[in-house]
Amino acid sequence: MYYGFIVKLPATSLLHHKIDNKHNTRPMENLPFYQEINNEAEIFEHAWRNKLPLLLKGPTGCGKSRFVEFMAGKLNRKLVTISCHEETSSTDLIGRFIIKGAETVWVDGPMTTAVKEGAILYLDELAEARPDVIVAIHSLTDHRRELFIDKLGETIKANPNFMLVASFNPGYQKGFKELKPSTRQRFIALSFQYPEAKTETNILEKESGIDHSNAKKIVAIGNKIRNLTELGLAETVSTRLLVDASVLIHSGLAKRQSMHVAVVEPLTDDEHTTTSLKDLCDLMI
């Protein structure tokens, strides 16, 4: 089976006719919500048009995956998302032979499908992937733009509309799982951070429907926790967690309980840290 393989199709599929690169965007009102911060949409579109691979760097839950989903919709492209982890092999992504009835047939993996069909291939948390996956994408990230399938002895040239996008969290397991310079320098790169308070408040309102006053309080709590470096949290509170808390509050769950289950509990298992964070939330909302 394939690990972490998700295919997302735009509302109007373009798989059955040629793309005109000058007239292929969708109306903004039909796109998933994304709050642009620093001209990243224009950079992404220029990378796609110029056939350049793109690396998104940033902490967990800061909007990298939503940005890719937004841009796939904006460019009206099929999106293939692969969540990388240590058990994902190049065979899972490229393809394999399977037994079908009395014969053996080849089945393309998600990476091969994306290369052939001109999709946007998104490798989420690339640094978590096995070395053979990194090796497999090298020929897709330079002037060759091709994929070698060793089991078939074939080399596939990428569809002109194909784009490779990868993401990773530079601060996660620093020194243990990092991208080698030889891999990083095959991409152009964008850095993502948690948005400023005003922008993050707007995101919570748009994503959850929560009122402005409570959105501001939730964002204030998030920023307070992010500044508590002395707690030694492996990961700090993400915009994603703040959205989850907002959704619960908007649906009618008590504010404090919403913050406890959506923000505090996912961050730590340490009893003293949990108590401290819950007390902080209770004071601020």
Image: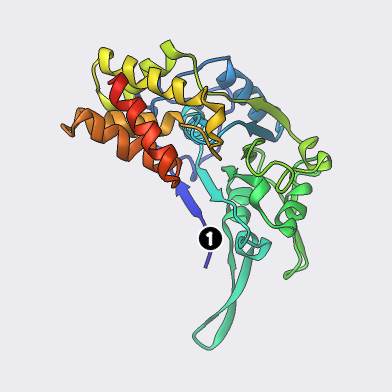
Q: Position of residue 280 (x, y in %)?
A: 36, 26
- Residue 156 visible in rendering: no
Q: Position of residue 115 (x, y in %)?
A: 64, 49
Along the horizontal axis of the image, is 94 left or right of 146?
Answer: left
Figure quadrant of residue 248 = top left
In this view, 17 is above or below 229:
below
Figure quadrant of residue 168 = top right
- Tell me the element at label 1: loop
**Where, quadrant-wise, is the C terminus in this rendering?**
top left
Q: Residue at x 64, y 32 (%)?
A: 57
In this view, 20 is above or below 183:
above
Q: Residue at x 68, y 46 (%)?
A: 127
Q: Name the foreground residue: 90 vs 102.
A: 90
What residue sits right under mark 1 in the picture?
Answer: 3
Callout 1, which amino acid?
Tyr
Q: Residue at x 36, y 37 (%)?
A: 275
Q: Position of residue 110 (x, y in %)?
A: 57, 56
Q: Which color scheme is applied?
A: rainbow
